[in-house]
Amino acid sequence: MDEGKLSELKQFIETCKSNPSLLHNPSLSFFKAYLLSLGARIPPQPKTEPDDFHEKKPDPDPPLSAQDGHDEIIESDIELDNSDVVEPDNDPPQKMGDPSAEVTEEQRDAAQLAKSKAVDAMSQGKLDEALDQLTEAVLLNPHSAILYATRASVFMKLKKPNAAIRDADTALEINPDSAKGYKIRGMSRAMLGLWEEAASDLHVASKLDYDEEIGMALKKVEPNAHKIEEHRRKYERLRKQKEQKRAPIKTEAPIKNEQQTEAQVQEALSALKDGQVIGIHSTGELEKKLSAASKTSRLTILYFTATWCGPCRFISPIYTGLAEKHPKVVFLKVDIDEARDVAAGWNISSVPSFFFVKNGKEVDSVVGADKSTLERKIAQHVGSL
């Protein structure tokens, strides 16, 4: 590793040691999530007491003139409702079944019996006993997503969110359409203060199989997730304003050109749907979306599918989840039987197929329902933008 980078990393760690509240900064949410996944204990965000005699008003944008002498704008803390956040559990990882093991009919029956005993124990409030029974069940039948999701719910009730997330992840690997897996993982992430990730999981769960518990969880999670998103947009706007202020004064002609370009970008953005999969039904419609993506410098993923395709049914909900996870990437979907002209134009010979497009040019592709490769290539191309 480069010595300069290593020195900067050491300096950053020392800064975090002296002021742990920095880890609650939204721009470091990825680092905070990584620490929590390792079982690290992060001090809660300090709360500020409101004035008893005056109604609290939202802070105005900090004046740019106060920031002019600095290279970066210092972000303020966000006041979030962390009343339900718990300390991360640092227990060793729980026992998991062998996914490569062959399961006999007798083992399936025994696992189902253990699950029934666990449900009885849960109804009596005997959570540790339920945990033991469910662990026996997953060891007997490691191919059951519902067993892992049910054990995850017990870990969550025991206020062990990291353990619950590990089980929910396993459940979703077995069954990507597991509503309970998304639900428990979302609620567990909320317990760790990972508000945006929690909201994303709960939204997927609500689409797969909505219930009142998901609705209640979203009411708690969404306000914090929205505050973080608004905070991020606010400081993106401030940085843009600062860059504009530093830029030299432009003549009238460049200003008009810039205004026209900005109008074109806004028009292009209106044609795209952040966080959603856009259905394509004709070549003309595809060209418009690719053009809009190019004008906004966005990565586009073109997914070819068919209603009769089994692997497509497996990968489609994952594709929808990735669209929510990467709102600045354009996710398009084409049914080859409905839009034959589009399929012919891209020489589609098998489905599912995924094509990565930047600035109107194909830069990569994935053939088949390969979840890990699809996720890796999205991360790779998003990082290169």
Image: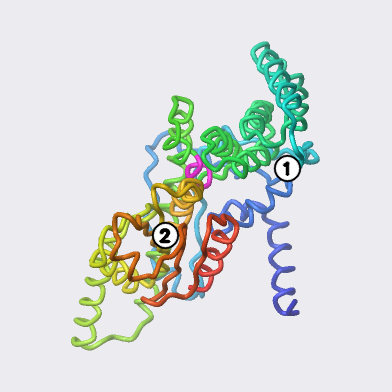
Q: Is residue 288 left or right of residue 64?
A: left
Q: Between marks 2 and 1, how big is the CA–CA gap? A: 29 Å
Q: What amino acid type should be assigned to the residue bearing mark 2?
A: Tyr
Residue at point 47%, 50% (across, down): 312
Q: Nearer the viewer, residue 311 or 20?
A: 311
Q: Position of residue 91 (x, y in %)?
A: 79, 38
Q: Quadrant of the N terminus?
A: bottom right
Q: Nearer the viewer, residue 200 or 230?
A: 200
Q: Nearer the viewer, residue 256 or 71?
A: 256
The prevailing secondary structure element of the residues shown in magenta is: helix
Residue at point 43%, 33% (across, down): 219
Q: What amino acid type should be assigned to the residue bearing mark 1?
A: Pro
> Can you identify the residue that label 1 sits on?
99
Q: Is residue 50 left or right of residue 23?
A: left
- Give the class, few, some or many, for how many residues have Cα within 10 Å of label 1's Cα (few <14, many ≥20): some
* 194, above or below 83, in the image: below
> Can you identify the residue that label 2 sits on?
303
| Quadrant in the rendering for residue 52 | top left
Report helix, strand or loop for mark 2.
strand
* Dot 2 or dot 1, earlier in sequence: 1
| Quadrant in the rendering for residue 13 | bottom right
* 66, above or below 307, in the image: below
Instruction: Report if residue 197 lies within the magenta region.
Output: yes
Residue at point 67%, 55% (across, down): 19
| Chain part drawn in magenta | 196-201
| Quadrant in the rendering for residue 335 | bottom left
